[in-house]
Image (cartoon, helix red, strand yellow):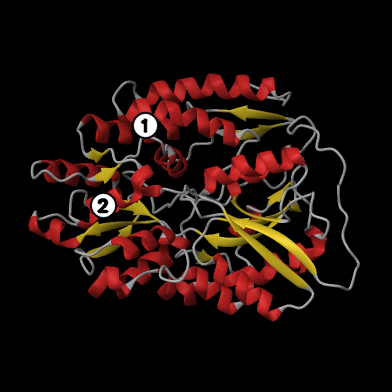
Amino acid sequence: MNSISPRRRVVHAAVAGLALTGLLTACGGSGSKDSSSSGPVTLPFWGWANGQEAVVKAFNASHKDIKLKYTKVTDQLTMQKQLTNAVKAGNAPCLVQNTAEYVTTWVSQGALADITKYVEADKDKFNTGAWSGAQVQGKVYGVPTSSAPAFTIYRTDIFQKYGLKASATWDDFIAAGKVLKKHGIKLTNYAGEDPSTLEVLAMQAGAHWYGIDGDAWKVNFQDAGSLEAARTIQEIIDNDLNSKLSFADYAAVQRNYDKGGTATRQISTWQMAGMVQNFTQSNGKWALSPWPTFKGEAAKTPAGTNQSGGLTLVTKQCENQEQAARAALWMSTDTGAVKTMASPATGNGVMPALADSDAYVGEAISDKLLGDNYEPGKKVVTDSLNTVTGDWTFGPDWTAMFTEMQSGWAKVVNKDQKVTDLLAHMQEWTVDDLKSRGISVKN
């Protein structure tokens, strides 16, 4: 859950098919200056993921006509701020690591290049959900890099000691937390700056915060799915089952898990990298189980656990868009590059966005961390890829909306307001924000 991220997630965004008239602000001219020069070109590439420097080095060693110049950004949210400034200044990099939730926002601001003609022939190399996350109205603006299996990781020794089994439902999860509480152990961690827990549970419960109604956006933070997610989260908070450790001190969060202060996380493969790199006491004591379901519902995992919907985007200010698209394709399909990024030791532990990614499951999870639970864990990961939601839409003001939600989420974690109060506020705020941007909204 809110272990979902120090760097925040992502996602298979259902944004293809948007009618742009009235839905997004005007985007201006094409800005394309594709070079037909036969000489080598240098493409600035910004990213934050571990392993990218090694991938860039391999790319440069194997290409004479294109060279990548890599700049490491602190994290995903910092990327959005720095890219905003660069676009305004007219010096945006050619290639940018990002996630699907931001694509519609960047297209609405005229920041991205339509690279459909350069990458369409490679479409079948990627899974359908990941490919849809790169599109707005059927146009492709980047190349998918990752998918997001989602699952629970839990301390087997602690669960066994107190007679607990892996939680099949959210009700089971809460019940386990109440047992752990009696022994001074927290069930999960909610960082006050990261409301992604609310997002992914709402997504899993069938909520649709943004949707399309004719030629206008529709906003709904009050639907049944959102309220079901709110009920679950509120019960965890009201019963003090959660730690409140900020990811600002990431090492402290990891120490807490390593020492047994908190017993579970709902995560994707990429978050295991931090555990592998920081744990010293609990290696071999962790196991994977399916993402909990809402009672009476079939298995369903949210597509929003951050590097899901990972993408390498091409900016409109890039003067060599074709070469940038080719470089992005190479980084997402070259066997060596994919293996580097899939490993939690050499990369970021991300599952590839490839149509056939089962072969990489073993790379993306850690036998050191899971011990005897490594082989069963591979099946949990593979199964989760088949139950990922694919009907979530990211609105054109997602970045601003999420920032606003962060302030309210901190109050929720500190028990200064209820989750339902935050949802009510976000309903009103988001409608007003879209209207203030001149974006058509019907509510």
Q: Of the residues tagged 1 and 2, which is closer to the observer?
A: 2
Q: Is residue 410 above or below residue 247?
A: above
Residue 438 can be seen, yes or no: yes
Residue denoted by label 2: 264
Measured in 3D between alpha carbons, the distance from the residue under mark 1 to the one under mark 2, in whole angstroms, is: 20 Å
Q: In which image quadrant can residue 146 be found?
A: bottom right
Does dot 1 land on a helix, a strand or a loop? helix
| Residue 162: image location, x then y, percent | 9, 53
Residue denoted by label 1: 230
Q: Is residue 344 above or below residue 402?
A: below
Which quarter of the image is occupied by the C terminus?
top right
| Residue 185: image location, x then y, percent | 15, 46
Q: In which image quadrant can residue 224 be found?
A: top left
Q: Is residue 18 above or below residue 370?
A: above
| Residue 242: image location, x then y, percent | 25, 39
Instruction: Please rate how many residues cluster around mark 1, counting C-alpha atoms within 10 Å: few if below 14, some from 14 to 19, many from 20.
Output: many
* Residue type, label 2: Thr
| Residue 44: image location, x then y, percent | 70, 59
Q: In which image quadrant can residue 436 be found?
A: top right
Q: Is residue 328 left or right of residue 415?
A: right
